[in-house]
Image: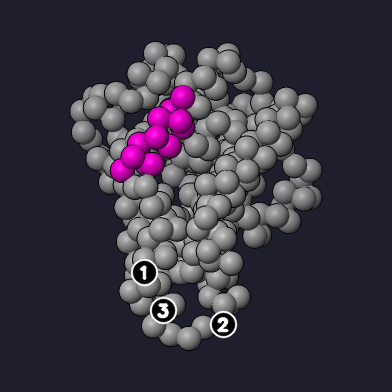
Amino acid sequence: MTDFVLTHEVTIRLSFFFGVFILMAVWEWRAPRRALRVSKLLRWANNLGLVFLNSFILRLLFPAAAVGVAAFAHQQGWGLFNYYAVPDFAAIIAAVIIMDFIIYLQHVMVHAIPVLWRLHRVHHADLDYDVTTGARFHPLEIILSMLIKFATILLLGPSVVAVIIFEVVLNAMAMFNHGNVGLPKELDSLLRFFVVTPDMHRVHHSVEDDEANSNFGFNLSWWDRLFGTYREQPRAGHQGMTIGIHKFRELKQSTWITGMLSMPFMGKLNSYVINRRQWNEKS
């Protein structure tokens, strides 16, 4: 199984990526949750252009990728699951959950630390919210995320199968919960006890400070509930809320790939809103 995953890792990941992407794109086209403010052609060309640039950079810098690090850790006997005998199925489930928790902590961190927020705001500055937003990140943040993932794998020692399952599920869920789609209210409420839904995560992309600093989860919704960062709905509702960042409203800043690449280096370095309370607590 491990040899098969290592041999076909790229094929497995790309198959799931394009399969989920096409499914979400069709869903958004047939039943959009919100009307888009910006030309879809313009946004998709630039957002996907950034995705392909990031993929090229990662393959250039880290040709072994996360599964290669997992295989190396196993060979060296490094990591928690390589020190203790844990049944394979239990080890896979535990590893996926722990790695998802690390992603949650990383997400909070890039909001809380000003220099990292400068990178992460590329993701938030999208003026619309759809399947392409889920993969829109600055190359430096992608590199940082990969290094954190490598460190987690070396300390945890998950199997190659666990890592590929985690990566496939995380990418699929990122596209799903960034989709410009909605679920029936009852189904959405039920799913939120387990995973992040589009309506749940959309709140996180609000221009309002307190809303943007809530619902950090990408996959499992438990972490936001456990750590007090859960917010059920945006104040203005999903149709009335504004997506993006207040000071990045022009297309050349928020939408064009040149603006996205230069965004971390624009403006002064100030404390970020996660450390401020400027909103009306009663609203």
User: Do callouts 3 and 1 mark residues in contact (Cβ within 8 Å)?
Assistant: yes
Q: Which residue position is annotated with label 3?
A: 82
Label 2 – label 1 distance at C-alpha? 18 Å
Indicate the secondary structure of the residue bearing disc 1: helix
Secondary structure predominantly adopted by residues drawn in magenta: helix
State the image coordinates of residue 43 (x, y, percent, origin top left): 52, 20
Q: What crowding class fits label 3: few (fewer than 14 Cα within 10 Å), some (14-19), or many (20 or more)?
A: some
Indicate the secondary structure of the residue bearing disc 3: helix
Residue 53 lies in the magenta-colored region: yes
The amino acid type, in three-letter code, at marker 3 is: Asn
Q: Nearer the viewer, residue 112 or 43?
A: 43
Residue 245 picture quarter: top left
Q: Is residue 30 above or below residue 163?
A: above
Left or right of 194? Residue 125 is left
Mark 2 vs mark 1, foreground winner is 1
Q: Which residue position is annotated with label 2?
A: 87
Label 3 – label 2 distance at C-alpha? 11 Å
* Farthest residue, direction bottom: 85
Q: Which mark is residue 231?
A: none
Q: What crowding class fits label 2: few (fewer than 14 Cα within 10 Å), some (14-19), or many (20 or more)?
A: few
State the image coordinates of residue 281 (x, y, percent, origin top left): 47, 44
